[in-house]
Image (tube, rainbow, N blue to C red):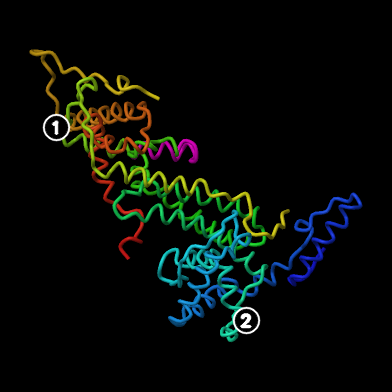
């Protein structure tokens, strides 16, 4: 049944469902109500949201009154039954303005308006605010705003993950973008009315991911992350891209081998001291951020609108190559032959260390503080690569 956005049509559909149920006819008042979504979208819900914020923040008097409404409702239980997830109180927060030059500011503005929407509605309906009462959003406008909020929450989570100021996040850049790509693709089916807009973002994202996979430093950063190594690539990348990334790493390790090989100690004699360095907490925070991005539910629509068409330590220790016996004569080599031989030996050293690194079980984030020590002493060549790669920023946001 196709209707306009008048709220009395919602009441009609609910009553119709009750009447049909008494006659044994299955009917869902939400699933069979074709809202005129385009009409609500044409009202520019994000622009409406921005106008509401500007009006409510226009003066100190208005800001204080909105805060008072929130607190009064919390104290007398007025919000009980009016909030999602069976919440009984609203957080005492201020509305946020967005800024075109600040990442996620529009998402945060919408998020705050949706959180405080019941209080905003009460505020706009007061007599002294008659001049701004027209800014009040009906249920359909709020539904569209919730859909937009659900869509841009995914890139917001990815941006938050990569914008850490003190944690090397470059290794998580491509996994975050690829996960964002997956989430948005799922949302095209969940919120099909906005699929066209999502597709525009997916096109841009696909181009960025394609370029990123051609950039060595992304691959190096992922592989030297002991919690990722090659595992993410093997699952989400083409086999040819995985082989290319591994080859890039071998080339980088071989270059460091030319600087001289650090002897590899036995694991049995290696003592890993307990570290109170904040590295472990930072790594846990990084993985927690990735977890939040992973757990975003894109299969369920939040708006009420529903229009659907391990290896052990002993495995890490590898015997060092035996040196030629004392007194054994070696043929004289030309300079070119010696250089070629050195390159081959460097490649073998790199291959041996890479092989041991791949066979070692991936470390979880809680072991990150000791991972640096292990990589320096057990994987000395990879450690040198890490020291060159880790300073690279994944995002320019913290420096803005």
Q: Main secondary structure of the magenta part?
A: helix
Circle 2 is placed at which residue position? 134
Q: Secondary structure at mark 1?
A: helix
The crowding category of the residue bearing disc 1, from other C-alpha atoms within 10 Å (few below 14, some 14 to 19, many at least 20), is few
Quadrant for residue 255, please give it: top left
Q: Position of residue 196 (x, y in %)?
A: 62, 62
Residue 276: mark? none
Give percent across and percent down for residue 354: 32, 30
The part of the chain drawn in magenta is 233-248
* Residue 305: quadrant of the picture: bottom right
**Dot 2, crowdedness within 10 Å: few (<14), some or many (≥20)?**
few
The residue carrying mark 1 is: 335
In front: 395, or 12? 12
Asked if residue 312 lies left or right of residue 58, the reply is left
Query: Where's the C terminus, which quadrant?
Result: bottom left
- In the rendered structure, the answer to whether residue 345 lies left or right of residue 299 reads left
Figure label count: 2
Q: Nearer the viewer, residue 10 or 372?
A: 10
Residues at marks 1 and 2, CA–CA distance in whole angstroms: 85 Å
Q: Secondary structure at mark 2?
A: helix
Residue 147 seen by the camera: no
Residue 41 belongs to the span the image colors magenta: no
Viewer-closest of 11 and 278 = 11
Residue at 24% in and 22% down: 267
Question: Residue at position x 40%, y 52% from top?
Answer: 161
Residue at x 46%, y 38% (from the top left corner): 240
Q: Earlier in the sequence, mark 1 or mark 2?
A: 2
């Amino acid at each position: 049944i196709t209707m306009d956005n008048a709220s009395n049509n919602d009441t009609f559909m609910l009553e119709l469902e009750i009447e049909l149920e008494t006659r044994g006819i299955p009917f869902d008042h939400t699933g069979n109500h074709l809202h005129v979504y385009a009409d609500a979208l044409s009202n520019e819900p994000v622009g409406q949201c921005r106008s509401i914020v500007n009006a409510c923040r226009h003066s100190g008097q208005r800001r204080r009154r909105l805060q008072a409404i929130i607190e009064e409702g919390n104290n007398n239980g007025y919000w009980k039954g009016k909030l999602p997830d069976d919440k009984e109180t609203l957080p005492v927060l201020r509305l946020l303005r967005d800024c075109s030059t600040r990442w996620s500011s529009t998402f945060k503005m919408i998020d705050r308006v949706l959180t405080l929407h019941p209080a905003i509605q009460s505020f706009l309906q007061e007599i002294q605010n008659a001049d701004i009462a027209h800014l009040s959003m009906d249920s359909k406008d709020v539904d569209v705003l919730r859909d937009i909020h659900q869509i841009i929450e995914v890139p917001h989570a990815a941006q938050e993950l990569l914008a850490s100021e003190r944690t090397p996040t470059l290794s998580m850049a491509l996994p975050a973008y690829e996960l964002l790509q997956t989430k948005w693709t799922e949302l095209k089916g969940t919120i099909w009315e906005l699929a066209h807009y999502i597709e525009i973002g997916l096109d841009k994202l696909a181009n960025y991911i394609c370029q990123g996979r051609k950039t060595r430093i992304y691959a190096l950063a992922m592989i030297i992350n002991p919690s990722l190594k090659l595992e993410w690539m093997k699952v989400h990348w083409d086999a040819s891209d995985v082989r290319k990334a591994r080859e890039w790493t071998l080339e980088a390790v071989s270059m460091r081998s030319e600087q001289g090989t650090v002897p590899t100690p036995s694991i049995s004699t290696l003592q890993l001291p307990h570290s109170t360095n904040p590295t472990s907490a930072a790594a846990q925070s990084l993985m927690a951020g990735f977890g939040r991005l992973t757990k975003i539910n894109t299969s369920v629509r939040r708006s009420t609108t529903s229009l659907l068409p391990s290896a052990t330590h002993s495995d890490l220790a590898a015997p060092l190559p035996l040196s030629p016996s004392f007194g054994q004569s070696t043929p004289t080599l030309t300079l070119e032959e010696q250089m070629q031989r050195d390159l081959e030996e460097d490649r073998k050293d790199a291959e041996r260390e890479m092989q041991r690194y791949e066979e070692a079980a991936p470390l979880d984030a809680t072991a990150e503080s000791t991972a640096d020590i292990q990589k320096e002493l057990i994987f000395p060549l990879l450690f040198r690569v890490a020291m060159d790669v880790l300073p690279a920023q994944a995002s320019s946001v913290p420096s803005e």
